[in-house]
Each structure stands twice: as C-alpha cells, then as structure tokens.
Image (cartoon, helix red, strand yellow):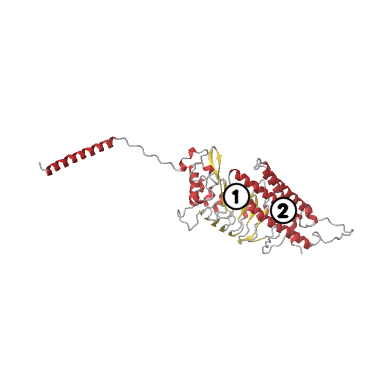
Amino acid sequence: MTWSRIGSLVGVVLLGTMITTAASIAAFAANRPTPAPRPTPAPLCDRLDRAEKPVPAAECRALLTFYHATVGPNWKSNQGWDNSDEVCTWSGISCDQIDGQWHVTRMLFFENGLTGIFGRLPEHEVDDPPIAGRELDRLTALRWLRIGHEEGLVGGIPAELGTLEHLDTVVLDGNGLTGHIPESLADLPNLAVLDLTDNGLTGRIPEHLMGAHVDCDGPDRCGRLSLYGNDLSGPLPSSIGRTRIHSLDFRKNLGLSGPIPESYGLLQDVGVLRVFGTSVCIPGDASVQALLAETQGIRRPVPYCDGASPVPLPTSPAAAQPTPDPVQPVPVDEPDAETDPASGREAAIRFEAIIDEFDVRAGDIEQSFERAEVASGDETVTLRAEVYADQAEWADDLATAVEAVVFPTQLQAEVDALIAAAREEARQWRLTAADRELIEDDRIDSALAAADARIAATIRLRGLLGPLAGDG
C-alpha cells in the first residue's frame, strides 16, 4: 500500500471521526437545558422598593432628567444623585408622606453650578438640546420650588409647572431665564409666592397670575409677587387686586406702563408695592393713592397719569395737630422739624435713605440664609445661628440710625415705637441664635413676631413722613 493510499485512508477516518464528534456535540447541545441569562442590575428608578422612603419611579425619572440636563456631575453638591435609591436624601430634595405614599415636595438649589436649558423656547428642537424641566409635571405633589442664582441655567420657564396643582411657592431668581412668563402659571390654584427677580423675561404679565385663594395669616405667610429686574412690558394685571397678597415688586421693568389698576386700592393685606423703574402712572383713584402713600416711599416718585391729580388723603390720628385757641398766642420756639418745613423734608429724606441702606443689608442676610438652607446637619444649625446673629445686629443698627435723625416732634411717638420694635427684634434674634434646642420653634416665632411689629411701625412712620417730603 502506497503512502498516498495510506494518507487517503487516514484522512477518511479522521473526517469520519470529526463528523461523528460534531454530531455528538450538536445532539448534546440540543438536549442540554438552556442556562438562565446572567441578571443585569435594574435601573435606579426601578428598584426604589428597597428605600426607606420610596417615591414613585416616575418622580425619580423626572429628577434624573433634570440632573443630567443640567450637568449634574458638575454640581457643587450632588450627594446621592444617580447612585442612591434614597431619593428623599438627594441634595436639594425633600419629601413628605401623603396618603401612605412618599412624594417629592420640595426642590432647592442655590449657587450650585447648574447649567443647561430649564424650559423650552421656540428655537429649541424637541430633544436637542435636552430640556431640564420637561418632566417636572411628574412631580405631582411638589409644593415648593427654589432655583436661585444659577446663572448657567437658561432657556424659558417650563410650562409644565402649570400642571402642578399643589405648587404654592416658585422662586426662580437670579438665573439666566428668558422668554415669556408661561400663561399656564395662572392655572395654579394655590400659588402664593412667585419670585422671578433678576432674569431676562419679556412680554406681558399674565392677567390671572396669582391664585385668588391665598391664605394670609401674617406677612411672612402671605402672598408675594416679585418680577424685579426683567424686561417685561404692558399693563399691570388688574386681577391681583382681588387677591390677598402682601408684597408686589415690579421695579426695573421699564416697559410696564399704564395706570396702576384701581382694583389695587382694594388690597387689604399689602405691605409693599414697588413700581420704581417702570413707566406706570398714578390714577386719580383715592384708594390707590392711599395705598401708595403707605407702601411706596418718598424717594421713588411715580408720575400721575394724564388728567389725574393728588387726592386729599385722610389724616392719621397720630399726625393730627391740636388746633390752637385763637385767643391765646402760639408760642414761637427755635425752628425745628415741626415748625420748619425744610427740616421736616430733611428728616423724611434721611429716614428713606436709612431704609434704602438697610434694605440692601437685608438682602445680603437673606442670601446668607439661603446658603444655610442648602447645607446639611450641624452645619445648617451653625450657619442659621450666624444669620440670626447678623439679623440681630441689623435691627440694632437700624434703631441706632433712626435715633440719630431729628424728626418732627408730633411724630416722636411713632419714632419711639419703631426704635423700641427694632430693639426688641434684635433681642429676640440674639436669643434665637443662642438657643440651639428651640432654633426652629418658639424662639423663631417670637423673633418673627417682633419683626412684624418693626415692619408695621416702619410703614406707619413712612406714611406720616410722606406729606412732609412735598412741602415747599
């Protein structure tokens, strides 16, 4: 047998063996049980049942959409986001249990480095770039939204916010937002605080912007609308006159024009109405003029509308002068702020300058408090105590500044009341700063009550000083 024949036979044998082996392997594979696929980790929002306070998966997904669209990995504080199933512990997020289910109820971000597009504008495509607020309507229990001083947050205000019927506080101040105020915000039945200060918003103010059923049991728990520092235009919304609101700030919107609505004269709880830096005018309505005399201040003159003129306002009992007996000569003393109109005007101007100065300081303190709010644990308590101490110093300094002004003698009782209220407020804030155990309870309530008394005394004194500013 030749070597070639042997090679052929070996090849056949080997080939047969390979075929047999292949067939055996195929048969074994066909009869072998299929192994279970290797489990893959479930997406974060699909495994929240293990959390101590599990929120609905839809709320978790809405937050993660917001997180990724605002470049969350680059935030200054992003603890828990996208890696912990305890959504209620993510930085800036708070939850409450409602009917046995945990829900996201508060979002708070302040100088946290958010960047991205918050709400869609006409020039934005559907999905490019990503829109941070496009799923916020899934946060159905959200009551409080604060995103402040995030200059990298641009785009519009998400219209989706208008579907959140429980939303009562929206503060979006100091961001880069543009476009119109969404009409959908007028659909929020419980909206009590809307602060859109220092953005680039344009267009008209929606007519029915603030809810008509705002509860008002104190200045700090009453309605507030601040649109300061935008580029809004058109008339002021007249429907606000039918709400219970404490503070209205339209300043620095030069395009706002027309008469202040006469319905504003019906406001019973308003303590602040600011229109400086707009093009609005004062109508001839006596109730509106009385409201401005109490709330607007004397260094922020507002022109009268064409054909309107000042209406004599009722004299406050504190400002009433005793009528001298015509038979008896009236004593003549050295000129003072009561008998010298120029001195009266000087007192009024100096007092308003004090208020302006302390308004600026109050804004700084408010920003410090916001920083304390975004801290955590013991740091929050420490920072709040520092803010309360600053507030005490502020109130003491205010009292000292007022004491240095020579006021008309017939107003001295009101001046003394303001000084006393400011000193008491300072005392209460110092106690609050020192008492860590009651820092959120009784002490806070006492300090806020003292602040309310100081605010009321300030408003009364400003109203009485107003007529003196126009003398001569």
Instruction: Give 356 or 388, whichever is nearer the viewer.
Output: 388
Under tag 2, what secondary structure?
helix
Q: Residues within 10 Å of mark 1 (few under 14, many from 20)?
A: some
Tally of marks: 2
Q: Is residue 431 visible?
A: yes
Query: What is the x, y in percent for residue 130?
Result: 47, 53
232 up-or-down from 48: above or below: below
Left or right of 85 in this view: 281: right
Q: Is residue 455 visible?
A: no
Query: What is the x, y in percent for residue 185?
Result: 56, 51
The residue under the point 39% across, 39% down is 39
Label annotation for residue 391: none
Left or right of 47 in this view: 373: right
290 up-or-down from 16: above or below: below
Under tag 1, what secondary structure?
helix
Q: Amino acid at mark 2?
A: Leu
Instruction: Give 29 or 459, whichever is nearer the viewer.
Output: 29
Query: What is the x, y in percent for residue 318?
Result: 78, 53
Q: Residues within 10 Å of mark 2 (few under 14, many from 20)?
A: many
Residue 89 placement: quadrant: top right
Query: What is the x, y in percent for residue 212?
Result: 61, 49
Please give the residue where the numbered disc 2 appears in the rendered image: 398
Q: Quadrant of the C terminus?
A: bottom right
Q: Amino acid at mark 1?
A: Arg
Most extreme residue toward the right, as rendered? Answer: 327
Residue 296 placement: quadrant: bottom right
Check if mark 1's residue and mark 2's residue have beta carbons within 8 Å: no
| First in residue order: circle 1 vs circle 2 | 1
Instruction: Give 396 or 279, whichever is nearer the viewer.
Output: 396
Label annotation for residue 371: 1
